[in-house]
Amino acid sequence: MVTAGLELFNSIKTRRSGNPNLKHYACIVDLLGRAGELERAYEFIMNMPIQPDQAVWGALLNACRLHRHVQLGELAAHNIFNLGAGSIGYYVLLCNLYSDSGKWDQVIKVREKMKEAGLVLDPGCSWVEAKGKVHAFLTGDNCHHPQAKDINVVLEGFYEKMKEAGHDGQDCGCIDDEADRSKAEMFCGHSERQAIAFGLINTAPGLPIWVTKNLYMCRSCHSLVKFISKVVRREISVRDTEEFHHFKDGECSCGDESYWEEINNKR
């Protein structure tokens, strides 16, 4: 794929119609980056005959996120921000790079820069129906819910059960260190967790739970809900912006690995 892409790119330069534009260069950086050839992608940028723009550096930053290359990703982000890019997407990519690499202190710093720049992420919100009413749960606002204590007890119980079952704490969201857990909650939101726990508390055993979310479901929440569906023996459905997830007996209808590969390619 890389060879074919480079051949096509080089063919543009041999045509009389002109030279490749910035979009063409960004495509090649993206192609090399997704193939894991990050250093080659960087060298390609440095040898460009025209000044790389935010899209070119953004393609490299996204590739660094995919392959968790923090040092090169930081360099790409530095060049993006030096060009005056105000898009929230680049900040999110950098946050994802740091969070995937376990660098939560850097996540905090990036989010502080976002606030200083006036860039605000849409808060995660999940809705669940119980006892004939629809209840909303907003990211970071669950402490004000009248059943917040009960909801947290339920979730903590599942976190402990996951650890006992041998699940990786960082991957499933049940992080041992309280500070790290707070950082993860701040970054990811996980509003569907509160909605599902509320549904478990306020509906009869065995009844299905339906949740709708305004953002896509992160992988750690996905792992947690699979686990919950197996433990409580309930069907749990979560409709996010990308997929209709139907959880039953510890499995999800989305296809797991193929779904996450598709999501990674979009981000």
Image (cartoon, rainbow, N blue to C red):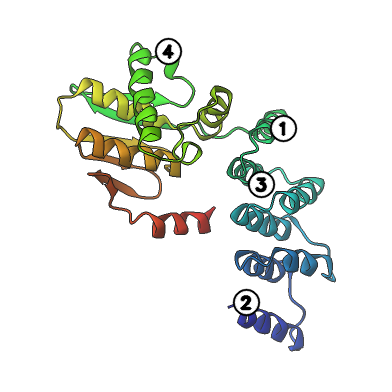
| Mark 4 surroundings: few (<14), some (14-19) or many (≥20) residues within 10 A | few
Residue beneath disc 2: 2
Distance from the alpha carbon under mark 1 to that under mark 4: 27 Å
Distance from the alpha carbon under mark 4 to that under mark 2: 52 Å
Looking at the rendering, which quadrant does residue 43 occupy? bottom right
State the SS at label 2: helix
Looking at the rendering, which quadrant does residue 111 occupy? top right
Residue beneath disc 1: 113
Disc number for residue 90? 3
| Mark 2 surroundings: few (<14), some (14-19) or many (≥20) residues within 10 A | some
* Residues under numbered marks 1 and 2 in contact, where contact means CB atoms less than 8 Å apart: no
Image mark count? 4
For marks 3 and 2 on the same chain, the one whose residue lies earlier in the sequence: 2
Name the amino acid type tagged 2: Val
- Closer to the eye: label 1 or 2: 2
- Report whether residue 218 is seen: no
Distance from the alpha carbon under mark 1 to that under mark 3: 12 Å
- Closer to the eye: label 3 or 2: 2
Q: Quadrant of the N terminus?
A: bottom right
Residue beneath disc 4: 144
Q: Is residue 113 above or below residue 52?
A: above
State the SS at label 4: helix
Measuring from the top left, give residue 265's x and y in whole percent. Answer: 52, 59
Name the amino acid type tagged 3: Tyr
| Mark 3 surroundings: few (<14), some (14-19) or many (≥20) residues within 10 A | many
- Report whether residue 251 is seen: yes
Residue at coordinates 64% horizontally, 81% vertically from top-left?
3
Looking at the rendering, which quadrant does residue 148 occupy? top left
